[in-house]
Amino acid sequence: MRLIFLLFPAVLSSFGLIGCVSAPVTTHTTLSATQDLSPGKAGRAQIKEKRNIPLLNTVSKVYIHPTKLAIGQHTRYSLSDKERNIVLNEIEAQICFELSERYEIVSNKDVSSAEVYSAVTWFEPTGAAASGAAAVAGQFIPGPIGLRLPGSLGGLGAEAEMIKDGSQIAAIVWARRAQAIGTDTPSLSRLGDALQFAEPFADEAARIMSPDPLPPKREYTKHTDPCAQYGGRIDGRGFVTKAITGLYNPTQRSDTQDETDK
């Protein structure tokens, strides 16, 4: 108990850091074009986006390319080969999950009406020790809003575009860093925040790549799911771990995938 009280000054100091942990602007891109990007509805992320709704309305079948790691002097990340595959696979899986609700996902790009490319441009590791301390302190703080300690705030920068007949019809540049105060769950994994942010990135990517009006949501069984190669759409293990420990336990989709596809 004494340890918890000793932690509180550091926890409370996070309040003063909330204004300086916004994700940096991505200055390097793999997109085929950037001149028509405009600021979007950011929420807790920094976003630039482009949508050509008339052309999006002509798309029916989509081919999803493997997510890549951007290279260049302006990129920011420090990842081992295994960590790289885990992050890329999670982003690719979440993009598949989201787009498959809107389009038919095909495995042959020659029969597609559009192709989707994505990349990670920035990665900030989650501080494991500080995350663990925040989880312990969080057990004594009522309500859904948690506190994160300095040194534990990870982040992710990613981008994606949809190409039809050689032209970009939708694109997004997205970046987000964990907040000291909020609902970003601490993790003992260096990849914790980046993997948590894969889903909100995919949500936004799918939003800007969607036709208007939206078609009826596509439903699948485990036998018809075009994204079955990535495993389950809902990670029940992660929910259980969070409920018991207050920590996020990331799924490692690369454990069941052929990494040579990357």
Image (cartoon, rainbow, N blue to C red):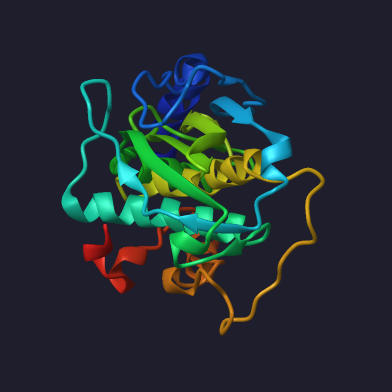
Judge left or right: residue 234 versus residue 55. left
Residue 1 in sight from this viewpoint: no
Q: Is residue 19 visible?
A: yes
Q: Is residue 29 above or below residue 123?
A: above
Give how far across and how far down residue 109 sits, in percent.
45, 59
- Nearer-the-camera pick, 64 or 140: 64
Q: Residue at x 60, y 55 (%)?
A: 99
Give how far across and how far down residue 238 sits, in percent. Answer: 48, 63
Q: Is residue 145 above or below residue 98?
A: above
Please give the name of the residue rendered at 45% of the width and 35% of the height, measured from the top-left corner.
159
| Image side of residue 139 versus residue 256, left or right | right
Q: Position of residue 222 (x, y in %)?
A: 57, 81
In this rendering, would 89 be left or right of 180? left
Classify residue 240 as left or right of residue 72.
right
Residue 71 in picture, x, y percent from top left: 23, 32
Q: Disc count in the image?
A: 0
Residue at position x 66%, y 42% in the image:
207
Q: Quadrant of the C terminus?
A: bottom left
